[in-house]
Image: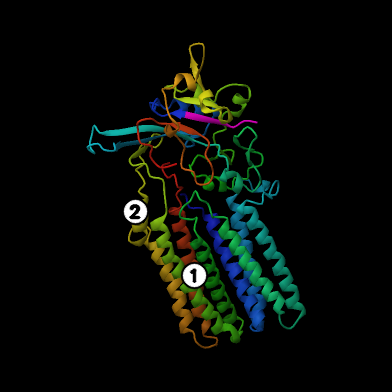
Amino acid sequence: MEIMWSLIVFTLCVCISAGTFAVQGLYAVLGRGTKAQLPALLVAFCALVVGGIGSFTHLQHWERAFNGFGHLTSGITQELIGAALMVVAMAVYFVVSRRQETVPKWAGIMAIVVSVLMIVLMSGSYMMPARPIWHTPVLYLFYFAEAIVSGGAVAWVVSAASKADDIQALSARITALGGLLVVVAAVAYLAVIGSAHFTAVGYYYDTNNPTKSMVDSTAFLDSVITGSLAAYFWGTVLLGGLLAAVLGFIKRKDGASGLFMGAIACIGAIVGGVLFRVMLYVLGSSAFLFF
Amino acid sequence: MANYAILTDLNRCVGCLACAVACKALNNVPISNYWNKVLRVGPNPKEEGSGEFPDVEMYFLVVQCQHCDKPQCVEVCPTGASQKRPDGTVQIDKQKCIGCQFCVMACPYNVRYLNPEERVVEKCTLCEQTIASGGLPQCVAQCGGMARFFGDLDKGIETFEGAENGKERIVLGDFAKPFTQEDVHQLPDLGNGPTFKYLLRNVKWQGGE
């Protein structure tokens, strides 16, 4: 199907935002990384705003968005509720972090819970039986992996930049864990692509589109492993997964040297996230893929 | 109230595309959008045939909004623009549509389109204003092969009516060649419950139900 860049920006930024907010929430629970709390919160908030703007650019009539919004079975409505909850949670987090020396543990737990909820809601909005490649629990795994690797990498960069040395190594470990999960999710997706069920009618011909060739859904897996989509898949595995994992494991000690490594891991996570999402759109044919 | 649907007798359909053209003309469907389209299925080898010509079979499958029982497009619509009406049809309130196109993604049959000028999603309305006044959907009324029939599923498909044959509308129960329930098919159901029916005798239905 057509690549929807607005939604790619939205899901990418939500993963960055939720991942960063959850990781800083974890640090609040552990009582560490006080210096990095405010800049991390700023990054999480900005990412959410950019994602929200991206989402709005997808709407053809955004001015009507609040005219009748509220159909609760809709994934978009649920995402909006999740985003609103995140904004409220971030505001509360900001206030309590300014009033106290350290962020209280309850605020950290709140940040983690709200972030997890947001990722669940976002993943759920793409659960459509009509799109066999999307309609899988592995999509949840991929988005969670993306949130962890990008959240860890942002925390890594922020901790290095703000000299919050007590969380650098831990942020690198989280980045590494996220990178490994991205690899696991990408490999699991091979099984999804290989087993996805599309309607097959033998030979067919679209009378409205005479020059369009038949789609062979059994060739999707080959296109991902060695064909036209291989660069996207392996790019995700290498840049979004393995690079972050390797850098995260190499970084063993706290110290200022981590800024460059963290930035590389962060860029890799973002590039890998974009590549995989593009691949999901290209493969996102409907089950009835003849038109 | 009712459960309106269309049945297509695929043994009669000649693939003339009159339904597609009539729909385009009546509903002013934009270029590259098709509320009603025709897929040629086959030629595929006949079961227990030689596997080569002339042991092949094919049919023309008319595809449009299936006005499903549990429409996924309605479920994912954030504003309630897509609605299941009491007459069984699925309609779009264009004033409410924000053009998010999630309904386009959620439809298994690729029959929803973004109107590039109005920037809202559109699809087959089953000619709702015409049927409300007792008329037939244009794709049924203009069917060149007299293969399409419209009616209320609650009254049975035998009562479905097709284009006028001289003075009055043909009725499926009288006009169509004999068939059994096994000859009545539907597009693959992914939990959405398509209501449109397809009649296909002596040819293998492709794609599952």
* Residue B98 point in image, percent of width and height: 63, 45
Q: Residue at x 61, y 36 (%)?
A: B91
Closer to the camera in the image, B86 or B177: B177
Residue at left 50%, top 55%? A135
Q: At x 63% / y 66%, what residue is drawn? A: A46
User: For the residue labelled by badge 1, is the local secondary structure a helix, a strand or a loop?
Assistant: helix
Q: Amino acid at mark 2?
A: Ala
| Residue A108 inside the magenta-drawn segment | no
What residue does disc 1 label? A269
Give the number of the mark in front: 1 or 2.
Answer: 2
Seen at 53% across and 78% down, the residue is A174
Q: Earlier in the sequence, mark 1 or mark 2?
A: 2
Kind of residue at disc 1: Ala
Q: Quadrant location of residue A114?
A: bottom right
Q: Is residue A122 visible?
A: yes
Asked if both marks, 1 and 2, belong to the same chain, the answer given is yes
Name the image quarter holding the C terminus of chain B.
top left
Mark 2 highlights which residue? A219
Q: CA distance from mark 1 to mark 2?
A: 28 Å
